[in-house]
Amino acid sequence: MLQLLIPRKPNLKGCHQKKLEKIYECYEVVQAHLLPVVALGQLEIDYDELAAAALRCYCTKVPRNVNMAKLRNGYLFPEISIRELQHLEKYPHAKLISLGIGDTTEPIPENIALSMANYARDLSTAEGYSGYGAEQGNKALRKAIADTFYNHVPVKETEVFVSDGAQCDITRFMLLLGSNATIAVQDPSFPAYIDSSVIIGQAGDFEDEVGKYYDIEYMKCRPENNFFPDLTSTSKTDIIFFCSPHNPTGHAATRNQLEHLVEFARDNGSIIVFDSAYAAYITDDSPRSIFEIPGAREVAIEISSFSKFAGFTGVRLGWTVVPEELLFSNGYPVINDFNRIMCTCFNGASNIAQVGGLASLSPEGFQAVRSLVGYYKENAKILLETFNSLGVQVYGGRNAPYVWAQFPGRKSWDIFTEILEKTHITTVPGSGFGPGGEEYLRISAFGHRESILEASKRLENLFS
Ligand SMILES: Cc1ncc(COP(=O)(O)O)c(C=O)c1O
């Protein structure tokens, strides 16, 4: 967003050379401080002001981490939020419908919320107080996760690490690997894999012409290849990030596809980081866990989340499974290093959130969250039917809360802008997920039913 407003460093003609140097030196600081305000339309850019601000800036002598400077634009989702705010500035009376970021909207089932409320209240009593818990997570919750999500595969509760969410585990795992581990990602893909790799210093330089980081292997996943990469032309990497059901395309990998993936990882000695954050949305016979695939325990970890399964996007709770059989090249167990990272960089999930997680896995809680998932799936069905009836080619939506709509020959940011301008609906441009997402939009099915129905009507008016 910021780059959209000022695509490059200001060209301050006639400015004193020394002043100019100072501005350029402080450019990123000034940009970070001033431009969010500019982005909200609250400030006209006054370059003299900008120059003066740069000169007034006090800078420490600490150099910025060069890896942070390599990150492209803002993180995709905050950028979509800024677009929404800008739109509301422009059309203050518009009834904006957000089918963009993919945040859950429906309340957490009462028994689950109450379990957290009661636990929080008891923390104020001598009997109910508890401090730090086990860094790996509450034993009962680890067992409940193993019993609920892995009852059909050999996962031990001691291999389950409870966390504050899948996104944090993705970054912690990259930290564990260090900057020498090479990675492959699906293209398009959820941005956290690439951004974590950039931050850790593994990604190399961004190449504008192709929209990719030089040292990352992008595995194209498009309808032409049934959203599964051509592994015969995929370079060997240490790590393969693989998300299923896939954000953003909504495709759930078939058993056969995952068997190929595991075989590929075994042949190359790679580790698969399997992101199953949307596994609860699978209703056909696609695997819900990579550990359903024979041989996966020696080559995969699985990262998952309570966010989209139980509405815990704000509560924050997730988990990672690291099998004991997964070893580094020198035979050292990955689980030992993961344990060390969790102890050093995390210190355990909130005890309140963990009580909520446990309640969501109780028979009553589980039934309630299943119906929440069912609600969002029905939303996805409505959106799919809408696009189908309009002749727009759509994918996903059946095993995932995302619909992936194709607009041949169009730039995805252009379609995003057109839909926002004409219908007051935010979506996410596919290219925000990588060059393979160009021509597509991701439409989220997280929303109140009346908003989804209203959005469908507006889309019908636009496209029919
Ligand atoms: C594929 C994928 N993985 C991980 C996450 C992050 O999940 P959490 O909220 O547990 O950090 C998301 C969130 O949207 C996601 O789409």
Image: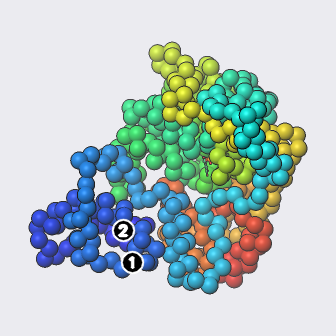
Q: Few, some or many C-alpha atoms within 10 Å of disc 2 (few <14, some 14-19, many ≥20)?
A: some
Residue 238 in sight:
no
In the rendered view, does 356 fall on the left or right side of 264? right
Residue that label 1 marks: 43
Q: Check disc 2 and give the amino acid type.
A: Leu
In the rendered view, does 27 fall on the left or right side of 68? left
Identity of the residue drawn at 16% across and 62% down: 21
Q: In this view of the protein, which residue sits in the foreground, 116 or 139?
A: 116
Residue 157 in sight:
yes
**How many numbered discs?**
2
Q: Picture coordinates of residue 416 (x, y %)?
A: 55, 71
Residue that label 2 marks: 34
Kindly identify which numbered label has been placed on residue 91: none
Badge 1 marks a residue whose secondary structure is: loop
- The quarter holding residue 296 reads top right
User: In the rendered image, which quarter contains the N terminus?
Assistant: bottom left
Badge 2 marks a residue whose secondary structure is: helix
